[in-house]
Image (cartoon, rainbow, N blue to C red):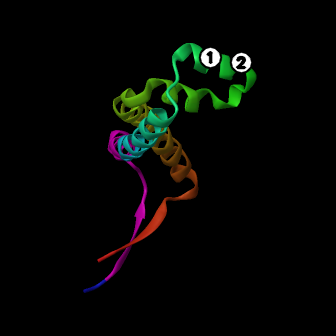
Amino acid sequence: MKSEIKQLKKIKVISLAKIFAVIGIIVGFLFGIMSAIQASANPMTFSQAMQYVQTSPDQVVSLFFLALGYWSIIVAPILFGIAQFIYGAIVALIYNLIAKYVGGVKVVLE
């Protein structure tokens, strides 16, 4: 087979955003499972979580999912998927803007 070097000049925004969203859903599901396991070992209510947040605000996300318990298996993939969809769209827009001036990534295709 003959290999060709092609330049990736533009990325379709929705296409990359969907890929990022799927990856976010998978990672969110794994995170949700780990949070649910941890929550079963250390059950916590939202009011208890808020007390911890006041003493250490950098733990907000972890405490939120810990307080959700088993619901984090459902909530985490949704939130991660939405966040990664937005992030993927932003990355594609920035890439398209930069690729106009600098040139795109060169890819070897067979």
| Residue 58, image quadrant | top right
Asked if residue 75 can be seen in this view, the reply is no
CA–CA distance between discs 1 and 2?
Answer: 6 Å
Residue closest to the eye, 23 or 72: 72
Q: Residue at point 67% right, 22% down?
A: 52
Image x and y of residue 18, in percent? 33, 41
Location of mark 1 (residue): 50
Image x and y of residue 62, in percent? 56, 33
Q: Is residue 25 left or right of residue 101?
A: left
Location of mark 2 (residue): 54
At label 2, which amino acid type do we have? Gln
Q: Residue at point 52% right, 59% down?
A: 103
Q: Is residue 5 left or right of residue 105?
A: left
Residue closest to the eye, 68 or 95: 68
At label 1, which amino acid type do we have? Met
Q: Are marks 1 and 2 in contact (CB under 8 Å)?
A: yes
The residue stretch that appears in magenta? 3-22
Image x and y of residue 73, in percent? 36, 34
Establish if 57 lies above or below 30: above
| Residue 20, image quadrant | top left
Establish if 3 lies above or below 51: below
Residue closest to the eye, 27 or 94: 27
Quarter of the picture holding the N terminus: bottom left
Count of numbered tags? 2
10 Å crowding of disc 1: few (<14), some (14-19), many (20+):
some
Q: Residue at point 58% right, 56% down?
A: 102
